[in-house]
Amino acid sequence: MTAAPDLADVLQQHLAGAPLDQTLAAIAHDDPRLQPLVQLLTERQAQLEDDLAQSEPEEDEDDQRRIADDQRRQAAMRLRKHVEALEDELARLRRVIESIGLALGACPACVGLEGACPVCHGGGHPGAVPPEQTTFDRLVLPAVRAQVHARARTERYGHDVPPAHNGRASGRDHQPKRREERP
């Protein structure tokens, strides 16, 4: 797989006159995970083109060109800010997925959910490798503890009991809390 061009570079190429739809199609082909972003950008480009086509200033030809240029620049700035925000969100989500993958001992790129993953090729399911201990302790262990406590409540009361809030028994749970001894 070839490296997908940087989205900021794609935007600069488009502003220089390169056809954006072809470049975006190449990005989506190279990295299918970017397909939603590419689709959004393609739709936004079509919307901006429609907006520009519908605006008909009543000034002379030079003024019309100047206004159209200003509108294109403003639209390009809005699009650039939008692309930057999407890139930031994508980077943040990739960091989240990576943390989850490390905590589960799974592929840090897809958590084992993508058969076509370029990192694990579909073999990075949870438990494929030992979890990264500090990330496991931070993300998974609290959920495991909550599950253990929920099962204990179910066994104790014979049905699901809502968990206590802030470590205190809820108003519906009038029985005294048993102390658990820790080794």
Image (tube, helix red, strand yellow):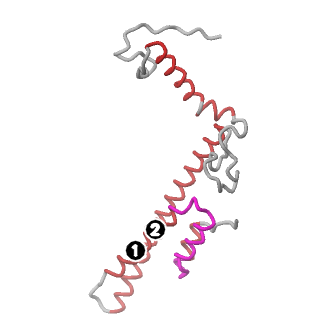
The three-letter amino acid code for the residue at tag 2 is: Leu
The residue drawn where x is 61% and y is 11% is 182
The three-letter amino acid code for the residue at tag 1 is: Leu
Residue 153 x/y as whole percent: 47, 17
Q: Taking 97 as reference, is 150 left or right?
A: left
Q: Secondary structure at mark 2?
A: helix
Q: In the image, is residue 136 above or below residue 18?
A: above
Residue 9 x/y as whole percent: 59, 70
Q: Main secondary structure of the magenta part?
A: helix
Q: In the image, is residue 63 above or below residue 126?
A: below
Callouts 2 and 1 close, C-beta under 8 Å: yes
Q: Taking 18 as reference, is 109 left or right?
A: right
Image quadrant holding the N terminus, namely bottom right
Comparing 100 with 160, the one in front is 160
Q: What's the CA distance linking mark 2 and mark 1?
A: 9 Å
- Which residue in the structure is indicated by mark 2? 79
Q: Residue furthest left?
A: 58
Residue 78 x/y as whole percent: 43, 67
The residue drawn where x is 38% and y is 17% is 170
Q: Nearer the viewer, mark 2 or mark 1?
A: 1
Residue 127 x/y as whole percent: 68, 37
Disc nearer the start of the sequence (2/1): 1
Q: Alpha-carbon neighbours of circle 2 within 10 Å: few (<14), some, or many (≥20)?
A: some
- Number of callouts: 2
Magenta-highlighted residues: 14-36
Q: Alpha-carbon neighbours of circle 1 within 10 Å: few (<14), some, or many (≥20)?
A: some
Q: Is residue 18 magenta?
A: yes
- Which residue in the structure is indicated by mark 1? 48
Q: Quadrant of residue 71?
A: bottom left
Q: In the image, is residue 150 above or below residue 136?
A: above
Q: In the image, is residue 110 above or below residue 9?
A: above
